[in-house]
Image (tube, rainbow, N blue to C red):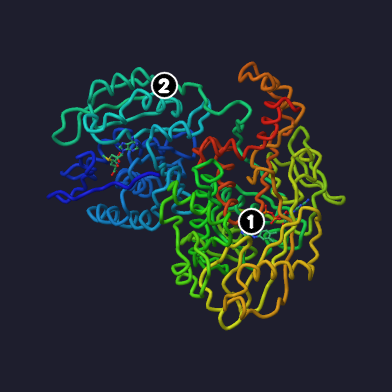
Amino acid sequence: MIRNAQIHFNDAGTPVADNFDDVYFSNDDGLAESHYVFYSQNHITERLHHHDRTRFVIAETGFGTGLNFLNAWAQFKQKAQDAKVKQLHFVSFEKFPIHLNDLIKSLQAWPTLKAFADKLCAVYPIALQGCHRLEFDHGAVTLDLWFGDIHDNLPQLSYGAEGFVDAWFLDGFAPSKNPDMWQQSLFDAMAALSRDHATFATFTAAGFVRRGLQQAGFDCKKVKGFGRKREMVVGRLEKANQQHNTPLFYQTAPRKLENVAVIGGGIASSCLLYHLAKRGISATLYCQDNELAKGASHNRQGALYPNLQADFTPPSEFYAHSFLYAKRLYDTVLKAGFNFAHNWCGVLLQGVNEAKQSQHQKLIEKSQWPEALIHFVTPLQASKIANVTLPYSGLFIPEGGWLNPAEATNAIYQHAKTLTDIKSHFDTDIEHIEKRENGWYLQSSGQEFGPYSDVFVCAGEHSDRFEQTRDIPLHGVRGQVSHIKAGPESSKLATVLCHKGYFTPAYENLHCMGATFDKNTKSREVTDQDNQLNRTQLMGFYQDTEFAQSLGDVTSAKAAVRCCFNDHLPMLGQVQQQDDFTSAFANLRVGKQYGFANPNLPHEGLHIITGFGARGLCSAPLATEHLVSAILAEPRPLSERVHQAIHPARFMVRELIRNKI
Ligand code: FAD
Ligand code: SAM
């Protein structure tokens, strides 16, 4: 687990890091220094007007108080109204994130940045290792905050041959005070991530820093430093160094997403449309039902919480960051005025049996997760949080809660529609997809649509329906949630309970109780038997509690089929053709990671987004954002190891390595 910074404020009111004994910014006008050293010396304003892309990417070592970021954002907002660049993307690393109250106090020094600082402080994340993607101004400004040592995080940023960074703010405490950061491996990684003509600027004129950057490939020169400082160093990389850090079989080919079709209508499709819309990309939706959210995303109340293991494994990292991002996305949509029923009332994972209790114990002992994300509670504390008497200890996730998935799906979709042009065809069951010379075509009972440059299949349990997707090893798991009448005691319940299933606080006098898991049927008929199962399961754990005894009858229920993969992770990426893939990467069968052929890509432009299982409300928002970022060769919000864990080729790669296909 990472640690927060311990800081104090010196006589000049400047924040100072205790463990580095160094200031976060100059005592003499830190904002002017930030502007001169990092922003001006990288010539950002001029470049925003003449850049070759609509997204400009700045990367910074050492986020600290965020002053460099806030200044860049303010400049972008004020000076780049008519610029070619429409999106500013700022990637920053921070080993010791400062506490929110210290951040607020530090930023009070800059009244001209107040509006920006307030927005940052409102979403400043908890001290969790990995990438926190924060979005501002409808996605015009993105901040990727990578918490943890930069040397641990750099290998987790995926980059292709072209790189993605346009300008580096090489900040950090003075090399003499922080020698661990200023290493050749940092300078080499900077070059690896850089695009053609990327620049850097740094306050230090230390000779070994300049030589290290030269060795990495940057042309360097000394220029006048800020204020009383004699010198600082700036530089430029002529050519991206054509490396990549993703194995060939897990790469995502960059595409422009010029003309997009989406097959779906659930939470995954809405999130995808929203992420495209933020980037000004319009799309056409095809949904087999007469309205959105009639598939798995149709429930009255779904629980929102991450699935965490004791260790910081790729799945846990995925769910933890997905959860935090999902919360931000839902809040953004709500703030924009698109409402859906929800309550961020926390989620209480109950230790209802010995197996659960020992799982909880292990998670606490390993202490990988910040308290603010998840912490242990005794039965008494659990009862206080829940506002009803509970017999079990548990783990509490204070930021969790519940939302109405169908309404949320609609709200995100409506918000996306305000950002770009989205056309929708309901009652349109896509039966076939076909690639022709000029693009992809979709066919539905005698009608044909297209051509499209790109098609995204977000069809939940039906995602393997097409000839091109039929080898995808998904399976359906039916689930039924029962709606049970609240009683006088149960209506006091103030948090979501998770035992083996989940039980929500009452909404319009009904609790949601569920859910069943049944692999042997794809039927969506509601059954009395499953209502009974849900009730028996709840009463099995809570029969002696007043809240459970006060419950009324089951009045209705909803059933649907979850789309799942064996490793409990979703699948996002370009659809792979199995024969082409296995022949290109045949060397994996004999344990070699080289000598691959370039694979044929017959399904180029066809992407799959599915397999959200029982967790789509938590995982769909970030996973879809990640895929869009990867396709557009932007910085990605998920680490390289998570990217590989959700890649469509993962099952084929595993089977090839085991020599099974
Ligand atoms: P879906 O919502 O199933 O959407 C698929 C869409 O594709 C549908 O709109 C359908 O009309 C459309 N479609 C399919 N085929 C075609 C075609 N050929 N042409 C045109 N359109 C097509 N998640 C949580 O996070 N928390 C929970 O508490 C929770 N509880 C759950 C309880 C139950 C009983 C179930 C079933 C699921 C639960 N989930 C929960 C899981 C969550 O609901 C799903 O992961 C999520 O809804 C999946 O969204 P999706 O968009 O991928 O799929
Ligand atoms: N740019 C910052 C601002 O605008 O406030 C000031 C940065 S401060 C001078 C340097 C920052 O680098 C500190 O917040 C420190 O914790 C961070 N840092 C130091 N070593 C690091 C490392 N190895 N990885 C990531 N961050 C590091």
Q: Is residue 612 depicted above or below 61 in this figure?
A: below
What label does residue 267 carry, if any?
Answer: 1
Q: Quadrant of residue 116?
A: bottom left
Residue at 58% of width from left, 46% of height from top? Answer: 623
Q: Is mark 1 within 8 Å of ligand 1?
A: yes
Instruction: Work out whether mark 2 precedes mark 1 in sequence or the reverse, and give the earlier one.
Output: 2
On screen, residue 658 versus residue 111, left or right, reads right
**Within 10 Å of the Cα at label 2, are there few (<14), some (14-19), or many (20+) other Cα atoms?**
some
Q: Is residue 326 depicted above or below 5 in this figure?
A: below
Whole-Å distance between the Cαs marked 2 and 1? 43 Å
What label does residue 367 carry, if any?
Answer: none
What label does residue 238 carry, if any?
Answer: 2
Q: Is residue 640 depicted above or below 546 in this figure?
A: above
Q: Amino acid at mark 1?
A: Ile
Q: Secondary structure at mark 2?
A: loop
Residue at 47% of width from left, 40% of height from top? Answer: 55
Quadrant location of the C terminus in the rendered image: top right
Q: Position of residue 236 (x, y in %)?
A: 36, 24
Q: Position of residue 320 (x, y in %)?
A: 51, 50
Quadrant location of the N terminus in the rendered image: top left
105 or 420, which is in the foreground? 105
Q: Amino acid at mark 2?
A: Glu
Q: Position of residue 340 (x, y in %)?
A: 57, 67
Q: Position of residue 120 (x, y in %)?
A: 37, 53
614 or 246, which is in the foreground? 614
- Please state the quadrant of the image where ligand 1 appears: bottom right
**Within 10 Å of the Cα at label 1, are there few (<14), some (14-19), or many (20+) other Cα atoms?**
many
Nearer to us of marks 2 and 1 is 1
